[in-house]
Image: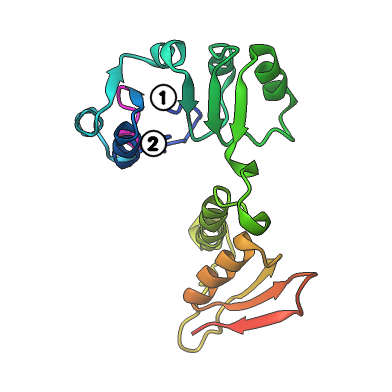
Amino acid sequence: MLIGVPKEIKNHEYRVGLTPTSVRELVARGHRLLVETNAGKGIGMDDNEYVQAGALIAADGKEVFAKSAMVVKVKEPQPDECNRLREGQLLFTYLHLAPDPEQTRLLLDSGVTAIAYETVTGPNGTLPLLAPMSEVAGRLSIQAGAHCLEKAQGGAGVLLGGVPGVAPAKVLVIGGGVVGDNAAGMARGMGADVTILDCSLPRLHITGR
């Protein structure tokens, strides 16, 4: 199968559908890989690393979509990308269709077979491709919140971990799933006074330090 990896075009998306290591694994299993030039630039991977892994480099995204039997992305296809999809082609990416009727309509019109990472289910109902992104989201939420609490950012001038003589900040995490657990762990690691509220668990209070 010819698998294509276009460069992500969504605003502030720097990831790439496949790393050179993943390309090498797929090539070893008999697939051909076509990677758009500079697709890996956002993660510090240049075209030469993809070539060494066995990929061919495409001049632009149009070539990737036109030639590939399967397109591997990170984020949902933007309207221009949806218009390049076709019947009989496979699309593998995060889609999050529920709040996006326009994308849903464009995908249906294209005839593509789209597989959403977030719906791939493992044993015991686990979501192995969604969980890593939820971990990132949980940890980033605390990092972003701490930044916004800085006085220079218009916040109250609160330091999550406090300092001698100043109590640590109180952080409330609503929901104890993958996102919540990682948010709580990050906040606790920064020294905050953390409380988790989850309807499926007793109320948990975790003090940092």
Q: Is residue 48 left or right of residue 123?
A: left
- 122 relative to 26, above or below: below
Give the residue type that dot 2 points to.
Leu
Q: Are marks 1 and 2 in contact (CB under 8 Å)?
A: yes
Residue in the foreground of this view, choosing between 84 and 34: 34
- In this figure, which residue is indicated by the disc labeled 2? 18
Element on which disc 1 rests: strand
Q: Give, as a single range, the part of the protein colored magenta.
A: 36-42
Q: Is residue 52 left or right of residue 126?
A: left
Q: Residue 113, position in %: x, y?
A: 62, 23
Q: Give the label on residue 28, or none.
A: none
Q: Quarter of the image holding residue 1? A: top left
Q: Give the label on residue 3, or none.
A: 1
**Distance in Å between CA atoms under marks 1 and 2:** 10 Å
Q: Quarter of the image holding residue 99? A: top right
Which residue corresponds to the image point at 27% horizontal and 21% vertical from the top-left? 56
Element on which disc 2 rests: loop
- 206 relative to 185, above or below: below
Q: Is residue 70 left or right of residue 138?
A: left
